[in-house]
Amino acid sequence: MVNTRLLKSTLVLRGENLKTMGTSCGFNRVTLSKKVNGRMNFKQEDIAKIANFLHLTPDEIVSIFCLNGEGGAQDVG
């Protein structure tokens, strides 16, 4: 599960958008849209690419990708 609002706001704060993130990380546009909107899960490798692209801190990764021990970590991948 992804916190879509937080991901999108982080993109804006970093001066990026979904298109540039998708291109940089090698994501298909349709697949990225499905993942961002919660219709598909992000794989661990996807999260790593996004974290690297946005220079996310560990806390930001946990918050954005709901890896807080409430089932989110099991949903990834």
Image (cartoon, rainbow, N blue to C red):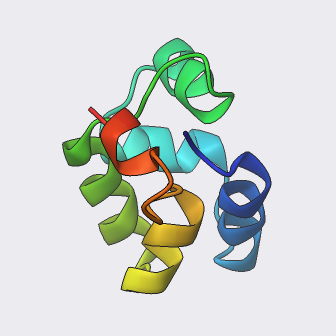
| Residue 71 place in picture, x, y as percent | 45, 45
Judge whether 28 appears above or below 58 on screen: above
| Residue 19 place in picture, x, y as percent | 60, 39
Residue farthest along the left direction in this orientation? 45
Q: Out of 76 and 34, give the one closest to the viewer.
A: 76
Judge whether 69 appears above or below 63 on screen: above
| Residue 43 place in picture, x, y as percent | 28, 36
Judge whether 47 appears above or below 36 on screen: below
Q: Quadrant of the N terminus?
A: top right
Q: Out of 9 and 70, give the one closest to the viewer.
A: 70
Q: Residue at x 46, y 69 (%)?
A: 62
| Residue 66 place in picture, x, y as percent | 53, 56
Q: Out of 36 and 65, give the one closest to the viewer.
A: 65
- Please identify the quarter of the rendering in which residue 64 is found: bottom right
Q: Quadrant of the C terminus?
A: top left
Q: Out of 6 and 62, give the one closest to the viewer.
A: 62
In-image side of 9 versus 16 (left or right): right
Q: Residue at x 20, y 45 (%)?
A: 45
Q: Residue at x 42, y 39 (%)?
A: 23
Q: Residue at x 23, y 46 (%)?
A: 44
